[in-house]
Amino acid sequence: MIHAVGYDPQKRILEIAFNSGRTYQYLDVPPEVYKGLMKASSKGQYFLANIRDMYETRRMGRG
């Protein structure tokens, strides 16, 4: 599901690249949510439960 993750703590932007090739930015994400994602045994489940549909989202495109 998730290919790569990046986070800008100053801007509080979480960027996730998915295996589909699409990349999204999630805005105003607290550092604790990013840390939780990185520590999660299942990043996909954590994303679905704690990030998707919870933050303003920008689609960045493919690849």
Image: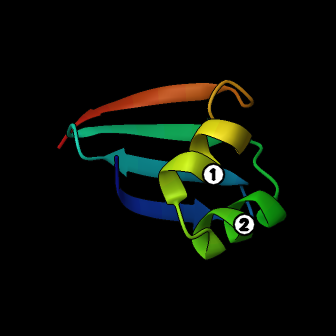
Compare residues 41 and 53 and report the one nearer the observer.
41
Rendered location of residue 51, percent (x, y): 67, 40
Locate residue 61, reporting x and y percent: 27, 31
Type of amino acid at the residue the image marks with label 2? Gly
Residue sitting at x 72%, y 66%: 36
Most foreground residue, 24 or 36? 36
Q: Quadrant of residue 54?
A: top right
Give amino acid for label 1. Answer: Tyr
Identify the residue under disc 1.
46
Which one is in front, 16 or 19? Answer: 19
Q: Is residue 4 above or below residue 16?
A: below
Name the residue rendered at 56%, 70% in the picture: 41
Q: Which residue is mark 2?
A: 36
Question: Residue 8 in the image: x percent, y percent?
Answer: 62, 63
Q: Nearer the viewer, residue 61 or 50?
A: 50
> SS class of the residue under badge 2?
helix
Picture quadrant of residue 33: bottom right
Residue at disc 1, secondary structure = helix
Lateral position of residue 38 relative to residue 49, left or right: left
Residue pictured at 73% horizontal, 54% vertical: 12
Q: Mark 2 and 1 residues: CB-CB less than 8 Å, in contact?
A: yes
How crowded pointer 1 is (Cα within 10 Å; few <14, some 14-19, many 20+) is rated as some
The CA span between labels 2 and 1 is: 8 Å
